[in-house]
Amino acid sequence: MSDRRNGELGAVPMRTDRFFAVNSAWYFATREGASIGPFESKYDAQKGLHDFIDFVQLAEPRVLSSFYSNLSHD
């Protein structure tokens, strides 16, 4: 089984689990390095990640720019 994602070229990058728990609260990590949560369960964190991906795909460029700018200040 390959770890290569559709459209990836070259060496397969190291992958880590995007979900983690701290004191029974669940979070997911974004590619930008932000931790999003807390969620009550890993399942809820997975649903949150899907919502986050939908947001990123549908948001207007100015909204995304503001969002990413605020991530870098945390």
Image (spheres, grey):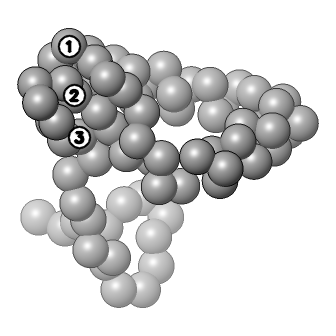
Residue 55 is situated, as x and y percent measured from the top left of the image, at: 62, 25
The answer to whether residue 9 is above or below residue 38 is below
Give 1 or 27, whichever is nearer the viewer.
27
Residue 74 is situated, as x and y percent measured from the top left of the image, at: 58, 46
Mark 2 and mark 3 in contact? Answer it, CB < 8 Å: yes
Residue type pointed to by label 1: Glu
Upstream in sequence: badge 1 or badge 2: 2
In the picture as drawn, the residue positioned furthest to the right comes out as 62
The residue shown at (46%, 79%) is: 9
Q: In the figure, is residue 26 to the left or right of 34?
A: left
> Which element type, helix, strand or loop, lies under badge 2?
strand
The residue shown at (11%, 64%) is: 1
Residue 32 is situated, as x and y percent measured from the top left of the image, at: 54, 55
Task: In the rendered structure, find residue 40 and report the number of the disc placed on it.
Answer: 1
Query: In this view of the protein, can residue 60 be seen by the observer?
Result: yes
> Which element type, helix, strand or loop, lies under badge 3?
strand
**Label 1 neighbour load within 10 Å: few <14, some 14-19, many 20+:** few
Query: In this view of the protein, can residue 68 be seen by the observer?
Result: no
Residue type pointed to by label 2: Trp
> Which element type, helix, strand or loop, lies under badge 1?
loop
Residue type pointed to by label 3: Phe
Mark 1 and mark 2 in contact? Answer it, CB < 8 Å: yes
Task: In the rendered structure, find residue 19 and report the number of the disc placed on it.
Answer: 3
Residue 6 is situated, as x and y percent measured from the top left of the image, at: 42, 58
Upstream in sequence: badge 2 or badge 3: 3
